[in-house]
Image: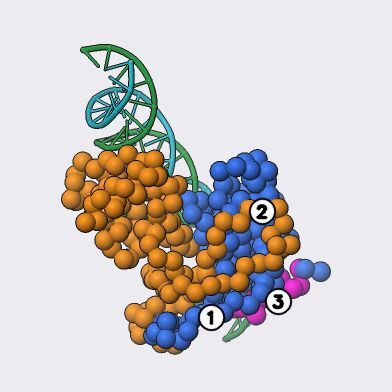
Chain colours: A orange, B blue, C cyan, D green
Amino acid sequence: MDADIIRESLESSGLRCTPQRYAVMAFLMERNSHPTAAEIFDAVNRVDPRCSRATTYNNLRDLVQAGLVREVAVEGRGARFEAIQTRHHHFICDQCGAVEDLDWYDVPKPAGAALGKRVFRDCELIFRGLCQQCAKRKPKS
Amino acid sequence: MDADIIRESLESSGLRCTPQRYAVMAFLMERNSHPTAAEIFDAVNRVDPRCSRATTYNNLRDLVQAGLVREVAVEGRGARFEAIQTRHHHFICDQCGAVEDLDWYDVPKPAGAALGKRVFRDCELIFRGLCQQCAKRKPKS
DNA sequence: GTCTTAGATTAGATATATTCTAAACAGCAT
DNA sequence: ATGCTGTTTAGAATATATCTAATCTAAGAC
């Protein structure tokens, strides 16, 4: 069951497993898409009307801080979220803003000198262009 | 002079060189930072009070469409902008959201099969961690 | 020069996204 | 039960971005 996995990952991150927090996490793990905060709020609130907008945002923030969820910023649109499962890169559609996963492969890190005194945590590769839908709709320019 | 360069790059992109548009572009080229739209508006409006918020946003949109400016989305914060000059990657601070440039180096593209029917336009590499300031302030955790 | 027209600009209103506030609630240790 | 800490709530507040309708400007046509 996912239920125990979710509970455990929450608690091992120091987060109480409240019904609302569980619902947000479960929703993100079920879906392989990258929903916006508004979509998450709608979905969770529809199932359990006792989950307010503020709670959805609070829990998303907590889950991101705990490293269980990743936030993906998209130009000109609301942030998107995904449960962190297997490592991957992202493809973002210029046209519709859809975020899609691409298989992971290693990326060369910058030289230590280039980083200077910064503390490196992670890197990600973002590809841009047109998703399959938009490419079909608008093959030229 | 930058003045002619800016005028020419605007006009060769089919954009009229209006005082407001020029001011936005000049501001972005002078600064090597990555200001938010609000910062750009404040700065341009302070110099020339006859540049409204809407115009600043309109011009940023036009400049991005023309390929002269890049928009950088940062999680949980307003969009940031930069004049496109030499190619580079980005480092984004987890703590303060600062965006810094790192020297460019080639990145392997994904296999054609992985991209499927998508249309590839560009890729960028984003490094995350703590910038020098924040690393000093908070060396642990 | 002045007419015309398309594009640009303006202030303020509006829309959208996110966070804050203050009060109430829940789980857990005393 | 009591108190403590963290959580949740509804709605207000803030931040960010875009829209609207009127006005202005520049450049070409005459």
Are dots 3 and 1 on a single chain? yes
Q: Secondary structure at mark 2?
A: loop
In the image, what residue occupies the spot 61% across and 56% down?
A: A120
Region of the chain picked out in magenta, as a range: B3-14
In the image, what residue occupies the spot 45% across and 62% down?
A: A74
Please, what is the three-letter code of the amino acid marked with disc 3?
Answer: Glu
x, y percent for residue B116: 39, 84
In the image, what residue occupies the spot 55% across and 63% down?
A: A123
Residue that mark 2 sits on: A118
Q: Please give left or right for residue B105 compared with residue C3 in the image.
A: right
Question: To which chain does the residue with label 3 belong?
Answer: B
Tag 2: Cα neighbours inside 10 Å, few (<14), some, or many (≥20)? some
Residue that mark 1 sits on: B109
Q: Nearer the viewer, residue A73 or B67?
A: A73
Are dots 1 and 2 on a single chain? no
Quadrant of the rendered image containing residue D13: top left
Residue that mark 3 sits on: B8
